[in-house]
Image: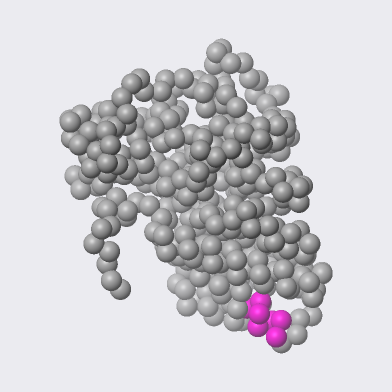
C-alpha cells in the first residue's frame, strides 16, 4: 500500500476516508439486498424492520438517501444486541431468546436466497470490523454498546466467518425505526437533525449515562500526541487563542499554525461564553446533544479528553456537513463547560426517552419532569425551513 506523504500527524485520531467509504458501500449494498429480499418475501419486513415501499422511496430520493447513507454511520444495526447473543451465534452454544426469535422468523428460503443472505451478512460484518478496528466511536457508528464493541473486537474474524457459514440468521436490521423518520422521508422533508435524533433514540449508548470528561487542561500526554492534537483542534477551526491556552503553548505558535493550516489568520474577538446558546433553538439543541453524545461515547472508552473531542468533531463534521450549526470553537466551550459546571444538564425526554441537553440554570427555566425533546415537542419540524438554507 502506498502511503500518502501529505497525511497530517493528527489523522491517526480521525476516521480514515476509506472507512467512511466502506460505510457508504455497506449501506448501499445492504439496503439494495433488503429492498429486493422483501419484495420477494414480504414476511421479511418484520425481520429487517423496514417495508419495501418505505426503503424504496428513500433510495429513490437522492438528496434524502445521501443524508442517510453517505455518513460514517451504518444504517443497519445488528439484530444480535448483547454479548450473550453474539456468543451464542459464534460459539453455537445454547441459543438466546433473540437467536431463537431470528431463526423462527426466517421463512423457508431457496438455496439462492440463502446464499444472498449469507453474502450480505459477510458484507455487513466486514463493515463492522472496519469500524471496530479503526474508530474509537465504533459503538455509536454501529449502534451498539461499548461493551459489545469491546467483545466483538476480541473475536478473531475467522471465527466469525465460520459462524456465518454454519448458522444462517439475518445479522442486520434497519436502524431508523422512528415513525417520524418515515413520515418526514415520505414527505420529502428529512433533515440531518431528525436522523441524528433517530440515531440517539435507538442507540444503547445514552448521553445521560455516559461518563463526563475530566476537567479540561493540564492533559497528561506524550509530546508527539500533544502536537498532533494541537494541530487537530486548529484544523477543525478552533481559535488559536483557545487552543494555545488549552495545550499550554505560546499564542504565537498557535497563530502561526492556524495560518499555515487555513491560509488566513485565526479570528479574534471574544470567545463564546453563553451556554443557553446551545439550546436556543431546536437545531442547535439536537446538534449540541449529538456532539456530546459522541464525545462522551469516546470518553467512556478511556481515550484522553482531547482525543475524544477530536474523534467526536470529526464524525460530527462528516455527518452534518454543510448543515453544521455548532462550530467546533463553540463545541469546545460546551464540552469544557459541561466538565466544570452544571448549568446545562442532560435529561431524558418525557415522551421518547432520548436524553438531551437542557437548561439547569435560572437563566432559562426548564423542568426535568416535564422536559420534551425538540422532536416530540414539534419545534424541530417547525424550524425546518431554516435548515434548508445553504450558506
Ligand atoms: Zn422526545
Q: Return the residue found at the far top.
A: 362
Relative vertical location of residue 272 with respect to residue 354 in this rendering, above or below: above
Looking at the magenta stretch, what is its main secondary structure?
Answer: helix
Q: Is residue 197 magenta?
A: no
Residue found 58% across the figure and 16% down from its top: 364
Q: How is the image coloured?
A: one colour
Relative vertical location of residue 369 with respect to residue 226 in this rendering, above or below: above
Q: Is residue 355 visible?
A: no
Whole-percent x, y for residue 63 in the image: 62, 53
Q: Quadrant of the N terminus?
A: bottom left
Of residue 22 and residue 129, the one placed in the foreground of this image is 22
Residue found 20% across the figure and 48% down from its top: 224
Whole-percent x, y for residue 84 in the image: 60, 62
60 on left or right of 262: right
Residue 310 occupies quadrant = top left
Residue found 63% across the figure and 47% down from its top: 195
Relative vertical location of residue 153 with respect to residue 122 in this rendering, above or below: above
The residue range painted magenta reads 112-118
221 on left or right of 353: left
Of residue 166 and residue 283, the one placed in the foreground of this image is 283
Amino acid at each position: 500500500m502506498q502511503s500518502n506523504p501529505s497525511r497530517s500527524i493528527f489523522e491517526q485520531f480521525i476516521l480514515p476516508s476509506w472507512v467512511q467509504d466502506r460505510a457508504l458501500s455497506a449501506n448501499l449494498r445492504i439496503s439494495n439486498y433488503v429492498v429486493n429480499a422483501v419484495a420477494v418475501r414480504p414476511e421479511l419486513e418484520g425481520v429487517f424492520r423496514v417495508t419495501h415501499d418505505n426503503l424504496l422511496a428513500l433510495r429513490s430520493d437522492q438528496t434524502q438517501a445521501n443524508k442517510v447513507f453517505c455518513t460514517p454511520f451504518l444504517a443497519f444495526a445488528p439484530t444480535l444486541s448483547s454479548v450473550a447473543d453474539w456468543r451464542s451465534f459464534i460459539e453455537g452454544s445454547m441459543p438466546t431468546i433473540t437467536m431463537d426469535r431470528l431463526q423462527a422468523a426466517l421463512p423457508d428460503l431457496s438455496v439462492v436466497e440463502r446464499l444472498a443472505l449469507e453474502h450480505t451478512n459477510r458484507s455487513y460484518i466486514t463493515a463492522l470490523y472496519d469500524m471496530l478496528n479503526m474508530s474509537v466511536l465504533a459503538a455509536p457508528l454501529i449502534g451498539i454498546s461499548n461493551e459489545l464493541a469491546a467483545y466483538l473486537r476480541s473475536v478473531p474474524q475467522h471465527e466469525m466467518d465460520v459462524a456465518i457459514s454454519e448458522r444462517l440468521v439475518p445479522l442486520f436490521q434497519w436502524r431508523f425505526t422512528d415513525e417520524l423518520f418515515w413520515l418526514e422521508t415520505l414527505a420529502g422533508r428529512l433533515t440531518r437533525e431528525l436522523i441524528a435524533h433517530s440515531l440517539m433514540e435507538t442507540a444503547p449508548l445514552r448521553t445521560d449515562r455516559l461518563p463526563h470528561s475530566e476537567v479540561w487542561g493540564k492533559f497528561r500526554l506524550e509530546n508527539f500526541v500533544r502536537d498532533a492534537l494541537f494541530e487537530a483542534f486548529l484544523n477543525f477551526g478552533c481559535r488559536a487563542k483557545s487552543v494555545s491556552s488549552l495545550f499550554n503553548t505560546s499564542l504565537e505558535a498557535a497563530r502561526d499554525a492556524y495560518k499555515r493550516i487555513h491560509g488566513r489568520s485565526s479570528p479574534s474577538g471574544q470567545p463564546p461564553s453563553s451556554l443557553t446558546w446551545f439550546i436556543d433553538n431546536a437545531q442547535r439543541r439536537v446538534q449540541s446533544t449529538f456532539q456530546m453524545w459522541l464525545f462522551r461515547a469516546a470518553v467512556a472508552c478511556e481515550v484522553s479528553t482531547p482525543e475524544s473531542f477530536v474523534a467526536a468533531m470529526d464524525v460530527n463534521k462528516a455527518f452534518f456537513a454543510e448543515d453544521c450549526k455548532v462550530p467546533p470553537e463553540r463545541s469546545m466551550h460546551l464540552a469544557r463547560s459541561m466538565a466544570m459546571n452544571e448549568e446545562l444538564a442532560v435529561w431524558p425526554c418525557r415522551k421518547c426517552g432520548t436524553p438531551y441537553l437542557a437548561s439547569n440554570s435560572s437563566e432559562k427555566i426548564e423542568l426535568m419532569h416535564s422536559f420534551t425533546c425538540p422532536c416530540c415537542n414539534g419545534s424541530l419540524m417547525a424550524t425546518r425551513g431554516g435548515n434548508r438554507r445553504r450558506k
